[in-house]
Amino acid sequence: MATAGSKMDLQLTIQTSDLGFDYDLELNSWQQKLQAFRVFGTKPKERLEGGLGLGLNLITQFSSGDEWLAQIPKQYLTVTKAFPEHEYQLLWLAANSEQAAQLLLMRPLLLVLICEQYPIDNDKALALSHLGQRDILNELGYDNAKATLKFIDKLTLKFERDVELKFLKKLLDKRMCRYKIFKHHQTINYVTISLDNRYPFLTCTKLGHAIANDKNLKRGSLRACLADTITLGLALGINEPAKRIGQLSSLDELERLHQQWIDLRNDARRVASRPRPVDADTPYPQLIPNEPNIVAIENYDDHINEGIIQKHCIAVYHIRIVAGHYCAFKMELPQRVTIGVKVNKRIGMLELDQISGIRNAIATNETREIVYTWFERVKKTYKQRFNPESELRSTK
């Protein structure tokens, strides 16, 4: 229960002793700088050093609570109600400092960050609130560039979740300055920072923007779809599935990719049930070295998987690859293609046989130019390393 004094001093006592504490809380009025005390039975009362750790909406449950809240300027209550854990301390700072009061109305997040750092030390919090805004950021361990304040002003958060502050503190950390990645955003909502925390590969992508701006989005379903798609990609042996997802432009494209990989996974399981050839465990000859974006298919399982993913018949080359008469490669960017190279071991010659996209799609001009340049380079290297005698012996 709570009791109030006269209308002039509007002192409020919250009888927390009824809740098992060994003291009651005494809250003075706005005019008395919202000073608060712990009141013990026979002992002298003690000044409350920091915040209450609970929202002032609790006060309305007691008699005279509404009256006590009404004497606090409404504009401050409007701002602080989004931060119940720090509400009393924020108001205390505003009541005790004109500079803190201005900061509460101008950039309340800075004052909230101060309370996050000093929740039980009003004096330190008050001293910090008297610094310039960039100095406050620096003292708290955050990047203090002008860009930081611009980032804060773009936020449209409602702070309905505890994790919102957690995400923001991580973004502002001066060791990483992750917030800078949002410099081209006009506004930044909760979905945007939540995605960046969990799926950073979506930040500043077309798909990321589509997700952040979809007001009808069901976040639970999205998280499940993203997690499932990444898991499917890894299971299929797709190189950097997260990067592939980040190249999408819309939620529809994400759903189509998710379904496509489900189909591929189901196809892979059907293939796995077929009898394996006797030489299935024989490693493929490494006649041409790998490069970062063009990687050799190294064994039977990898070979079969490539045919499933790309929906073409590269798998029929298994016998020729094992014999050293053919090499197959996969390339991810700028287009996902399979590359086939014929090998003439008698004369040390390589011949580019195919550049096949999904379902044998024709490669783009950009892709073909990259493959041609790569092939001319490896062809010369192979020719230089060619030893006719050893090759002839290997074919006998």
Image (cartoon, rainbow, N blue to C red):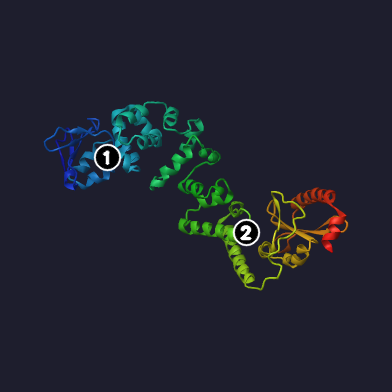
Badge 1 element: loop
Does the image show residue 292? yes
- Within-10-Å neighbours for mark 2: few <14, some 14–19, many 20+: few
Q: Residue 98 falls in which quadrant of the image?
A: top left
Of 213 and 337, nearer the camera is 337
**Residue at the spot 26% in from the left edge and 36% down from the top edge:** 72
Q: Which amino acid does label 2 sit on?
A: Gly
At x 53% / y 57%, what residue is drawn?
A: 226
Quarter location, residue 136: top left
Q: Where is residue 157 in the image (x, y as percent from the top left)?
A: 43, 44
State the image coordinates of residue 289 (x, y, percent, origin top left): 74, 51
Label 1 amino acid?
Answer: Leu
Relative vertical location of residue 297 with respect to residue 178 in this rendering, above or below:
below
Q: In which quarter of the image is the C terminus?
A: bottom right
Drawn side of residue 105 relative to residue 349, left or right: left
Label 2 belongs to which residue? 237
100 to 334, vertically: above or below: above
Secondary structure at badge 2 equals: loop
Q: Can residue 156 be seen in this view?
A: no
* Residue at left offset 32%, top offset 42%: 85
The earlier-in-sequence mark between 1 and 2 is 1
Viewer-proximal residue among 28 and 377:
377
Q: Distance between the residues labelled 1 and 2?
A: 53 Å
Q: In this view, does 253 lie above or below 65?
A: below
Task: Tell me residue 138's x, y (percent).
Answer: 45, 30
Question: Disc 1 vs disc 2: Cβ atoms closer than 8 Å?
Answer: no
Q: Nearer the viewer, mark 1 or mark 2?
A: 2
Identify residue for label 1. Answer: 52
Percent position of residue 318, x then y: 74, 65
Identified at 25% across, 30% down, the residue is 33
Q: In this view, does 285 lie to the left or right of 270?
A: right
- Which image quadrant for residue 130? top left
